[in-house]
Image (cartoon, rainbow, N blue to C red):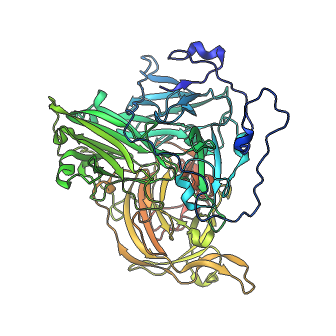
Amino acid sequence: MPELIEPPAEAATATGPASPAMPTEPVTLTEPASPAATTTTAAPAEAPPIRQIPQTPPVPQAPATPAPPPLTPFLDPLRIPSVLRPEPDPETGRAELTVRTRPVRVPLHSQLPPSLMWAYEGEVPGPTIEVRRGTRLRVSWANGLSGPYPLIKVETRVPANIMRPGFDPAADDYDRKVAALPPWSVVHLHGARTGGGNDGWTDNAVPPGETQLSEYLNDQAACTLWYHDHAMNITALNVMTGLAGMYWIRDDEEAALGLPDGVHEIPLVLCDRNVDTDWDGRPTGLLMHKVLRDDQDVPRPFFGPYNVVNGVVQPHLEVAARWYRFRMVNGSNARFFTLRLCHEDGTPVDRELVDRAFHQIGTDSGLLPAPEPLPERGLTLAPGERADVLADFSVLRGLRVHWADAATNPPGPAPSPEVLQFRVADEAAHDPFTLPARLSPSYVRLSHATAPDHEHRWIVLTPPAATGMPMMWEMETVEDASAVEIPSDGIVQVRMPGRPLLTLRRVAETFNDTTTIMAREGGWEQWNVLNLGGPVHPFHIHLIRFQETRRQNYDARGFQRLVNGDGTVRGYGTVTPVTFTGDLPATGADRGWKDTVRVGDTAPAPAGSGQLVSVLGQFDGGSGRYMYHCHILEHEDEAMMRPFTVMPGPVMDMHPGMSGGGHGHGSGSGHGGHAS
């Protein structure tokens, strides 16, 4: 169980037994001393020597430190978070809830020392919050954190090092700024239809002792949401400390299905983690955010060596031979999981058994119209994506099977790809549930052709090979291409099938650039997101749910770094148009309601391969300032997040530059344009 770290005055208010008081004074993180200097003394005569690392050290070809012994998979049981079901006040009709963050010590694995983490209500992941549709819930997110920042940040020059615990003195370097970070946090309820003031604006984080007040209307279909930290510049670090949990909305349509519930409905928060080691290569439990600094001198996102489910490394779950419901979220910083069912010896379970046992019934934002089999390559979840899965373990009676990660996107699976083991009982279990043929009668499939009058937006995601860091550009359509120089910085031309050559011009790229996307409350919009190559990006829009209406592959080799005659870079743009190469129609669960969509090919693709994904949704349920971003958290913290606003139509009409129009009606509000 996690060990709460509380000041003595607050120990009596903990829900469990009081833990010994732990020191909460801030500490300064320094590089480790040599083994000879680590002898404990009451008052050392001299400070231990600090190893001097050259500014430009030669990069070794292999790790210099010994690898720690691997952890035993499936040694520990899965941890199940508690459930909070706030009841509405009969007079006001509103429910209220206080959720406090606390420092805790959490054993990620019984072969690891406990890790200092930050947690909602002392749990990693935080408690699952469960509400009925239409129940207005006011949450006081109280910051009760204290003490030192619970992780260290390391950059390495050796690719093999990112999948190893510990610090390599020959190739790694500490980021000392992290030790000075305060416990500054703001909560975003991911997928919620709520006002901008309740959405968890990234700059509105609160310090210890203060409280973020958010009110959620919960006026949306039954779905699997999750809450997590969203603080500006440090989301990747704060989430890694443990600040995440699930939030489920129930409705009558879901209740009518009689789905597995209670102990047979289980939240699964997947992620990956890394820890530091001592000088003998033994893990210390201290969380480590270790990333590769590549040959362009750009830090890559975090990938860790340990697959974690509900705060436990490679756990097991004892299950009866009956139906279960798994509510899943990928809470990783950057790792994509592709889950494939395997036997104890690692061989894949026969496809016929998998099809009989596992069925996906929901996506990010609601139920599917009908159950879908899991994809043949495995169930892929990008960071921020959710899946609602039913499992009939009567098909697998007496077996021990596990999910293994078979992801092919870089850097591939962790060194030990096992994720979660199911130990299925031999005995038959009485279970009256049968899989319904139809799940959501209210589901309507959207398409561009049948959509209501709507706006269009264009977003371009740049490839690291050209721009170093991937960047997110907001674009406007250029009606007269002769009015711009081609090639020139920020100009992207796209050759789509059956359409005139499209010319797009960059109008914003950093978070603090002028807000250019202003959506009409209640209005429909199609966002066209064009990835010009490089990593797959999980693209998340706050406030709305949407459906994927188009996915196309493109040859994006024409997008390049533009260089002057003297070798200086003058910008980035297309020297030849980005050109259509093929359609990829949405199938299966990809047709469901989403709020996070993968843009790019999760299978290995040739260099210069681009992809266009279009999503269609309605901007209702709230107004104010929101964000959209890549849900690879390091990308979000660096340069891939932008604001947008939602306003009532009559308010927009008061300003001629905001009024906009629908599909095919003049210039779009906020430079959206109308090329589809």
Between 381 and 54, the residue placed more toward the observer is 54
Q: Is residue 334 left or right of residue 437?
A: right
Query: Is 60 drawn above or below residue 479 in the view shown?
Result: above
Is residue 41 depicted above or below 56 in this figure?
Answer: above
Q: Which residue occupies 55% across, 69% down?
A: 463
User: In terms of depth relative to the viewer, which is nearer, 447 or 578?
Assistant: 578
Q: Position of residue 667 (x, y in %)?
A: 54, 67
Q: Which quadrant is home to the C terminus?
A: bottom left
Task: Give the image quarter of residue 103.
Answer: top right
Residue 476, percent from left and from top: 57, 69
- Farthest residue, direction front: 36
Question: Would residue 460 be found to the left or right of residue 452 on screen?
Answer: right
Confirm whether residue 676 shows in the render. no
Farthest residue to the top: give it: 12
Residue 83 in sight from this viewpoint: yes
Q: Is residue 157 above or below residue 262?
A: below
Residue at image point 66% right, 37% down = 149
Identity of the residue drawn at 85% across and 33% down: 45
Total tally of numbered discs in the picture: 0
In-front residue for pair 131/193:
131
